[in-house]
Image (cartoon, rainbow, N blue to C red):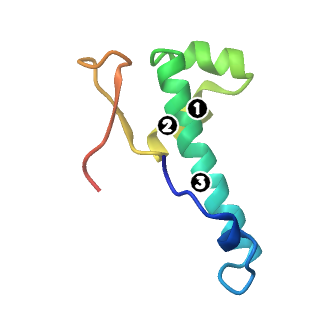
């Protein structure tokens, strides 16, 4: 499920700065959000963007940023890239 932090780590300022915690949480949220969008909308980015009231290009960029590639052989039309 992505990067998950324990509460004692999140609220221990000696371990992570506020900005580092915020960045990590946002990255984790975005990763889970993208997975959910792909599954829920069966890969239909246009329909997802319309329902989410966001620009389709922004959603495509977010999907690609999180490592997904187009793949027509999958149910959703997307697959997580295995290359780094």
The spot of residue 75 in percent (x, y) is: 33, 15
**Marks 2 and 3, Cα distance to the nearest angstrom?**
12 Å
Distance in Å between CA atoms under marks 1 and 2: 6 Å
The quadrant of the picture occupied by the C terminus is bottom left
What residue sits right under mark 2 in the picture?
63
Toward which corner of the image does residue 48 lie, by quadrant? Answer: top right
User: In the shown orientation, is residue 28 left or right of residue 65?
Assistant: right
**Which is in the foreground here, disc 3 or disc 1?**
3
Q: Locate residue 79, reporting x and y percent.
A: 32, 32
Between discs 2 and 3, the one toward the N terminus: 3
Q: Which mark is residue 59?
A: 1
Q: Which mark is residue 27?
A: 3
Give left or right: position of 63 versus 74. right
Between 9 and 84, the one lying in front of the other is: 9
Against 2, residue 72 (above or below) is above
Residue displayed at 40% across by 44% down: 67
Task: Measuring from the top left, give residue 23's x and y in whole percent.
Answer: 66, 63
- Number of the front mark, 2 or 3: 3
Earlier along the polypeptide chain: callout 3 or callout 1? 3
* Rendered residue at 59%/36% (across/down): 33
Q: Which sits in the foreground, 48 or 6?
A: 6
Task: Rate crowding at label 3 as few (under 14), some (14 to 19) or many (20 or more) other CA atoms within 10 Å.
Answer: some
Q: Are marks 2 and 3 in contact (CB under 8 Å)?
A: no
Query: Which residue: 45% across, 40% down?
Result: 64
Label 3, secondary structure: give it: helix
């Amino acid at each position: 499920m992505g990067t998950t932090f324990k509460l004692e780590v999140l609220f221990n300022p000696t371990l992570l700065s506020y900005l580092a915690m915020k960045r990590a949480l946002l990255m984790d949220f975005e990763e889970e959000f993208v997975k959910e969008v792909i599954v829920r909308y069966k890969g239909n980015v246009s329909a997802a963007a319309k329902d989410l009231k966001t620009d389709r290009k922004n959603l495509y960029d977010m999907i690609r940023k999180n490592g997904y590639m187009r793949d027509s052989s999958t149910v959703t039309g997307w697959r997580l890239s295995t290359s780094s």
